[in-house]
Image (cartoon, rainbow, N blue to C red):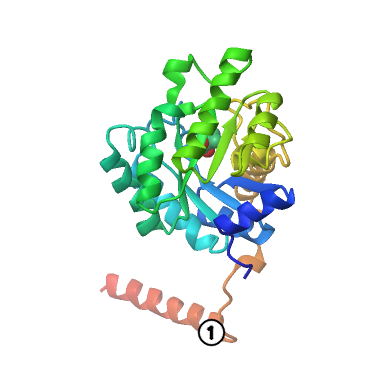
Amino acid sequence: MREKVTITTLQAKKARGEKITMLTCYDYPTALLEEKAGVDILLVGDSLAMTVLGHPSTLTATMDVMIVHAQAVRRGAPGAFLIGDMPYMSYQISKKEAIRNAGRFMAEAGCDAVKLEGGRNMAEVVEALTKATIPVMGHLGLTPQSIAQLGGFKAQGRNVDTALRVIEDAKILEEAGAFAILLEAVPPEVGKIITKQASIPIISIGAGPQCDGQLLIVHDMLGFFDAFTPKFVKKYANLNETILQAFREYIDDVTSGRFPASEHFYNMKPGEAARLEAQVKDRNSSAVSQDGM
Ligand code: KIV
């Protein structure tokens, strides 16, 4: 088993200029593979509402669902740094509720940290969680839980005023105690400035190459979700095609009788098949003679 990835590991990587790798993960088999490959950070993202559960946005994810998925991922990836994504309205109502819900990720699922969306408006919550011993990753730029306010899934910080606001928010989150910040869908110039100014790791999902690390949604990078594909996605596989092909071959094999073949049978012990056949024959013939009585 690899050495456990901790906050210290991530800070050391930033200090050495070594890139941090991060992927979303929602289930046990994928966690086993991400762990085996050596991904640093696994995020149980509320994006699972879309990629796994088929909802049109992330707003329907609940704490109970997130906890079940986080537990499965932790079982498959004991060495990764595991982050539970705080779902919509699990941290916005009060600091007390935020601590209770974030505490569930830590205590019930064995997460190493939580992530929440928002800048200056969430500084007090970040501070409260940090004081309660819960490490927090901030999330700025395109924040999917605010799509109603943002007017959809749109890149942020594309002019000087909005860029400066994201840069200020990053400072505020760091001062509030965030151990890292995720920057989503902002121009690379903004990613570069924030990464240079921050002493904590800055992870990019569509924020350019100069950030301390990169995140992709695992279903996007595997080509396993194609409702829409953001510009920042690089596809490393085309699972949709592979899986569809397998399903079609299966249907073809079953309907044509090619499956199951002899290698898929449980053979009887030597001599037992003939004995079974004889006994069934005997029983059937005595049943026929009783019917005739
Ligand atoms: O839920 C998630 O996977 C996320 C990413 C979109 C960054 O928050």
Query: Looking at the picture, how far across and down is residue 146, in whole percent?
Result: 44, 23
Quarter of the figure with residue 164: top right
The one nearer the camera, 228 or 206, is 206
Query: Looking at the picture, how far across and down is residue 264, in whole percent?
Result: 62, 66
Could you tell me how many numbered marks the image carries? Answer: 1
**Which residue sits at x=26%, y=42%?**
96
Quarter of the figure with residue 180: top right
Query: In the rendered view, does 103 fall on the left or right side of 24?
Result: left
Query: Looking at the picture, how far across and down is residue 154, in whole percent?
Result: 57, 18
The answer to whether one can see residue 39 in this image is: no
Query: In the rendered view, does 209 fall on the left or right side of 251?
Result: right
**Which residue sits at x=40%, y=32%?**
122
Q: Does the residue labelled 1 lie within 8 Å of ligand 1?
A: no
Query: In the rendered view, does 71 fall on the left or right side of 9?
Result: left
The answer to whether one can see residue 254 in this image is: yes
The one nearer the camera, 52 or 71, is 71
The one nearer the camera, 76 or 210, is 210
* Tag 1 residue: 272
How packed mark 1 is, by other alpha carbons closer than 10 Å (few <14, some 14-19, many 20 or more), is few
**Which residue sits at x=55%, y=39%?**
181
SS label for mark 1: helix
Query: Looking at the picture, how far across and down is residue 153, in whole percent?
Result: 54, 21
* Amino acid type indicated by mark 1: Glu
**Which residue sits at x=61%, y=26%?**
185
Image quadrant in which the N terminus is located? bottom right
Image quadrant in which the C terminus is located? bottom left
Quarter of the figure with residue 290: bottom left
